[in-house]
Image (cartoon, rainbow, N blue to C red):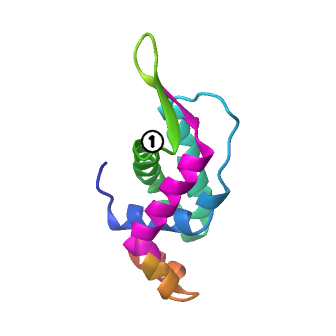
Amino acid sequence: MSELTPLEAHVFAYYLANSAKDFSMVGRWFSPSYLAETFADKMSVDVRPFGKAAQNAAVPAAKHYLAHMIAQGGFENKEQKFGGSMHQLDAAGFKVALDALKAADAVLAAGEAGGADFWATTFAELTN
């Protein structure tokens, strides 16, 4: 997985703190590009209050998140006959992978310990 910039890492952690737990989808196979776009959109909506720079950081954060979730069993994987892969949500695996990700994220831990103003203050610093 790729390394995230500080802004991307905060977008990633903010999504983990807020909307990640609410994700669900129909039981069919999706391309990685479709899933990356879906997560980027969800992250972008979450960080909208923090400005355009935070929203723009959602794309690399979403790709990082998806790579982790695929690698850790949050999605079932199948190779296509003509190349490429498709992914289907594995609800149980997704929850396990999400819980592990939340437990290991230092920015999320700082956000939980930082009080009510942590996210607004930090995003203001990172986007100015």
Residue at numbered disc 1: 70
Q: Quadrant of the C terminus?
A: bottom left
* Residue for point 55% across, 62% down: 15
Vertical placement of 121 versus 32: above or below?
below
- Residue 57: give x, y in percent of width and height: 44, 57
Q: Quadrant of residue 46?
A: bottom right
Q: Which kind of residue does numbered mark 1 sit on? A: Ile
Relative to 2, does residue 11 appear above or below in the rendering?
below
Q: Residue at x 43, y 81 (%)?
A: 110
Q: Residue at x 46, y 47 (%)?
A: 69
Residue at 52% x, 68% y: name it. 14
Whether residue 127 is visible to the viewer of this picture, yes or no, is no
Q: Which segment is the magenta one? A: 86-108
Residue 61 x, y percent position in the rendering: 43, 54
Horizontal side, residue 28 vs residue 54: left or right: right
The one nearer the camera, 94 or 17, is 94
Give how far across and how far down residue 51 sits, in percent.
Answer: 54, 66
Q: Is 91 part of what is drawn in magenta? A: yes
